[in-house]
Amino acid sequence: MSETPSTSYSVNQPNSSESEQSLIMRHFNVTEPVVAKRICFYKSGDPQFSGINMVINNRSYKTFDALLDSLSKRVPLPFGVRNISTPKGRHSITNLEDLEDGKSYICSHQRKMKPINLEQASKKPLPWQISRPVSARRRAVQLAKENEDGFGHRESKITTPKKMLVFKNGDVRLRRTIVLGKKNTQTFEAFLDYMSELMQYPVVKLYTTDGRKVPNLQALILCSRAVVAAGREPFKPSNYDSLGYSRPAKLLGIANRVYPKANTKSESENSKKWKVSVLTSDMPSAGTSSKVYMTLYGDRSSSGPIFLDGEEGKLFQKGNEDVFTVNTRNIGHLYKIRIGHTNTGNSPAWHCEEVQLLNLFSGEQFSFPAHRWLADGEISMELPVLQQGQPILPVTVYEVHVTTGDLWNAGTVADIYISVYGERGDTGSRQLLRSQKSKKFLKGQTDIFAVEAVHLGHLYKIVIGHNGLGSGNGWFLDKVVIKDPTTDLDYTFLCHRWLDHGQDDGSIARELIVTDASTTQPHCNCWAAEKWKFQRGNALQFYNRLTRGFICLSPDSRVDALGDKKNKYGIFDVNVKRRNICIFSSHQIPHLALALVNGHVIGKSRDKACCELCVHLQPNGCAILESARNPGHTITFNLHGKVADETTGYAGLSKEFVVHVKGVFHHGAIILLNTSLCQALSLRPDGSCSGAGQQQPESYWKVHKIGSGLCMFESVRNPRMYLKIKDDQCNGTGTGDEYCHFRIEKNLETGSVSLESVQHKGIYVGLLPDGQTKPVINTGERNIFFYPQVIKFGLEKPMGTSAAPNQEKKDFSESQLKPAKAQKPISQSSLTFSPSKEMQNPQGGECPLPSHDEWRVSMLTGNAGTEANIALWVYGDRGVAGPITLGKDNRKQLFLPRQEDEFQVKIKNIGNIYKIRIGLDGLQNEHSEWNLQRVTLQHLKSKRTLNFPTNTWLSKNCDDREFLCELPVVEAGKPVYPIVVYHVYVYTGDFEQTDTDYAVYLCIYGKRGDSGLRLLHKTGIPVTFQRGMVNAFEVEAVSLGKLQKVLLRCEANAKSQYWYCDKVIVREAENNSEYVFNCARWLPFMSQGVIHSEIELYPQGMDYSNFRGVRSVICNFFSEEIWAEFNLHFKYQG
């Protein structure tokens, strides 16, 4: 039987013994033998305790136990001094002879010692500290501070005070009320010490009132308002909850039930006494080994769970009637009860026959026929009060629809609990056990459960959570819908949040308020996730799912939705006006933009107000374009792709468009491969990949374009780690070989892409339900869809398909790039140069050739041929075209000894051509070399020929030969510009670990273009950039004129191999000029969360005023710290 509860609250303060002031003994150096030992004793784990100075000799203490008894009176410990140890707690003292004169020792009431800071403890306390005893709370705070200094581990803190009742294990009569605050919850260990002093017995463990262990401060803070303090003995069940101190559970994994708020009026006014009779049926195995509890509900409040205790092993047995007397506060008129058990013991199943109640104050009698098994998850039931044999309230089976979010790794294997609240009470905490699906709580799945309860009336909230058990217990809950069959009403409770210790706010339980069915609440901020597409300067295409075509704006201002993805009139440049209002101007016809006039879309001058369109993003990822001037007017097309008019029926209209961004997979781009609106493919520290990563820098990938539609993806956070598919594994441990090559397969309908392995055709990067990557085949499911998001755009650097020889009549696709694009990618940004006066018409002042000119390239091979492809760059006074790859699949027929090969290529208008660069590209036989005799470029329209005579050798393995060369145009037997040898001196920093063995590249920029990216090496000598050394190199190139900058690159992938460059000096012997480029920087370096392997350096003493306009370009490479130094340099250089 339960004890009568006491409703008066009292706070028992711990008793602390009076501190004794002792004279601090002054230590003297003596030469005579010590007769007495002067020793100071401190309290274990209490740095505020000033210490007890004692003189110990054979007369004062005959035995070691006598010393312990004396110390117990002077050192305030709950059970006296039982152990003495050295200050660090390593050695125990067991007899008087072990004590040393002048030393300090620690006293404790248990074997485990807590070290203290003797320097602080030995300081003489200030007067106001001596005037009052040190409380346990102050000791706990000081202990926590010491733990921060290295003696312990700092745990979770409580932010708001919380009142809690603490019971002694097995004895509900011994209880203390405490207030959890910052002072007594600095650490869990300190809190246990505080409880030991408060309860006057050693507290080692804490339990909830239903027997679940509280392992840490976080669990203590989140659990209900009553706990059980225990020593080393196991939990002892008792009627801890009969007083109603437990409140609605905030952590369902610790408390099995959600308790209603109890009334707090005094017992004398509101107490009730009940006689409870519980009949167990006489069916076989009807008895139970579990603890049985009951909750009474009245129109004023509820009693809270009351455990029906008695002699263990004799209660609730087959055919028994067990009688109890219980006390509750005044709950008003009784209308239902809940009875259940804890599902523990060897045979927890129970068949309850009937429950009878007698109000001993009023004499009212209630009978609740049950006739029901409580087993297999259904371990509680609700019974309404009967009036004239009929229930006053119906028993309803609620249909609970639980929808798990459609995020990767959103499912859980933990136990889910729910408590439903209505105007007539609550259901208590119920485990959602039996779903109509074979597996519960999977990604994107809706599970349906039945919850039986006495009808609650109108529902207003639920509390739902899990117990945090099992691997991968985190759960993303989308929503809960409860269907009431009695009233035929549906109640929706939206969540769309994580219930996970490691996500969101760390909570594993949520209180959800009912949502009006008419309320539209988007799951996620679609604009925040997709607004990157609508940044100024982006080039977009708008795909219509209904017409299966792209929006196109023709030169005659007509607009339709019938274009294909290669239609040049279907690309639009973004001009942002404000937030989500943009102007979309034609990329091909810049003065025209999409406009809505009287509800019809046409092309108008981009400066018109009718061109301002408001972008509305939908949850399905599509965009609606609405007139900003006339809201309600949207860009709409009919089934045939024509502009909709009044005759078009509503069913035949389409106004949603999938937005595609051009240039996402350009070389050097930094992108996210999003798997949902708020998740992305990320590389984990162990090399595995997960689609459940956060959209943060650790999920950034760098694009390496290796061909048309072919890319590699390198982790930005972990350079040299590539996404790969190999040996039936998909992870991020690739090294950049063929297993890291992926074909980009674009999905126009969804705006997503799929990554198909080039090495294993038909195999894609796929995701398992928990987000882990795995090689899969395309089955039409969404697990292979990735939604790319550009963090930083790269450069359009198509490698180009092989140009066909003339006899095959096959044109080579054109390619035009900005300067300094050599055999390796140089940068994710470039600096264009304007032609100087000496570059204007070096070939006799003729006008530039027309755009899209067709050229014939002839190459004469000397005595040695090559099987490699040949890369060609062509430089003009208006730009550069290349690299253009000259070769074909049957390479053995090209570049044979003493053979002249011809290719036909298209080159955009780059002005008057003055030089070319030739390099080996994709060499198959590393031991071969090529003898080039002559190169000729002939303009097919004007028949004008440019000659580049040479007799040079190119090789990748011969130490005395380069694998690229530059050739100037030769006219009348003389080159238009001379070939110059630039002497390069690279200075490595003179301090530890500044050297590197990795390759270093250099590109020199001048008024006449660039040298291309060159590997710095010496003939026959492997180059190592050593500490404090100067390395000298030679770079041969067509004269660049006055030098403007250099680009330095080092791709060390290990921090131990990072290189510190002090400066670079470039000398030109012909005109006796020298350029000093100060660096003083590590390579690679981190900027804005991205690792950069290259840096641009400008010459010392250069007038930087001419370059103030290029800050936006330079900022892409330099951190704010470097830019501040750059501005400072501006200041002092004028």
Image (cartoon, helix red, strand yellow):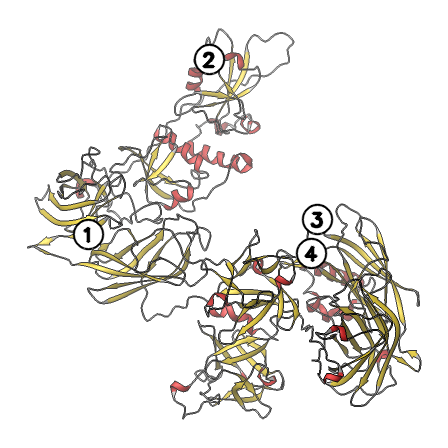
- The reply to whether discs 3 and 4 touch (Cβ–Cβ < 8 Å) is no
Q: Earlier in the sequence, mark 1 or mark 3?
A: 1
**SS label for mark 3:** helix
Can the viewer see residue 228?
yes
Q: Amino acid at mark 3?
A: Ser
Q: Nearer the viewer, mark 2 or mark 1?
A: 1
Identify residue for label 1: 382
Identify residue for label 3: 1056
What is the spatial separation of the Cα atoms under label 4 and label 2, in whole angstroms? 65 Å
Identify residue for label 2: 64
Identify residue for label 4: 1085
Q: Nearer the viewer, residue 876 or 800?
A: 800
Q: Nearer the viewer, residue 172 or 36?
A: 172
What is the spatial separation of the Cα atoms under label 2 and label 1, in whole angstroms? 64 Å
Q: Position of residue 40 (x, y in %)?
A: 53, 19
What is the spatial separation of the Cα atoms under label 3 and label 4, in whole angstroms? 13 Å
Q: Nearer the viewer, mark 3 or mark 4?
A: 3
Q: Earlier in the sequence, mark 3 or mark 4?
A: 3
Q: Quadrant of the C terminus?
A: bottom right
